[in-house]
Image (cartoon, rainbow, N blue to C red):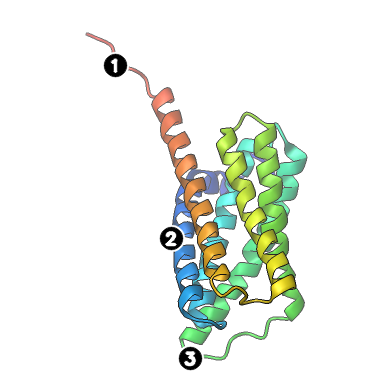
Amino acid sequence: MTGGSGVLNTLERWSPTLFLVSGVALIGFAVSMAVIIADSPPRSVFGGLGFTLSFLGLLGLYPGLADESPLLARAGSVFAVLGAVGFTMLFVTGVTQVAGMAPPAWPDPLQILNIAGILLGFLLFGVASLRTDAHARTLGVLLLMPSLVFAVNFVRVAVLGAWSPSWAPALLGGLQALAMLSIGYVLRAESVSHESAERPTDTAA
């Protein structure tokens, strides 16, 4: 991957929007966990779509970080791609179930793509952002949040079980949505600030 890639540059321009739409989809994901105490097609649709868009937004950060932190940015991009693939599979599964069709028979081990993407993709991009001047430190901290929330949830499930306490899945899902919305907001504010700085000032005739 290189910072000059046309696809990555396009994702860079769309990154704020991708994160914002991701956050909206993940609100639906959190609501579905609050009202349905079981795996469900709507949850797969909202969760799959939300996290897929967030990983595409994450890839959009690569061009801005590649020059100052190439190793972290490149490694983070690999895990972002893995996460995007894994959650796209989850989204397709949900859509086929909602449509009343049999879902694809994905091999169970492929779920590791989702875990690796969230834990390592966001972590590596967050650290890379904090180590460079490409973005505000606020963004670097926010990029660490999805990994932290997922790690807390992973430990909770391992110790207490998937639905104990019953309110935890919805709360943690809501925190993921808030993290994505916050990342999108910060990126949008940075974009507006850069455009304002680059716009030539009017001069009196």
The secondary structure type at the circle numbered 3 is loop
The reply to whether callout 2 and callout 1 are in contact (CB within 8 Å) is no
The reply to whether callout 2 and callout 3 are in contact (CB within 8 Å) is no
Q: Where residue 24 is drawn, which disc sits there?
A: 2
Residue, disc 3: 100
**Residue at the far top in the pictured view:** 205
- In the image, residue 186 lies at what x, y percent? 48, 40
Relative vertical location of residue 198 with respect to residue 91 in this rendering, above or below: above
At 61% from the left edge and 42% from the top edge, which residue is drawn? 141
Q: Upstream in the sequence, badge 2 or badge 3?
A: 2
Residue, disc 1: 202
At 57% from the left edge and 40% from the top edge, which residue is drawn? 139
- State how far apart marks 2 and 1 are (Cα): 38 Å
The secondary structure type at the circle numbered 2 is helix
Q: Where residue 85 is drawn, which disc sits there?
A: none
Instruction: For residue 137, say whether it is visible.
Output: yes
- In the image, residue 78 lies at what x, y percent? 72, 54
At 51% from the left edge and 74% from the top edge, which residue is drawn? 33
Q: Upstream in the sequence, badge 1 or badge 3?
A: 3
Q: Upstream in the sequence, badge 2 or badge 1?
A: 2
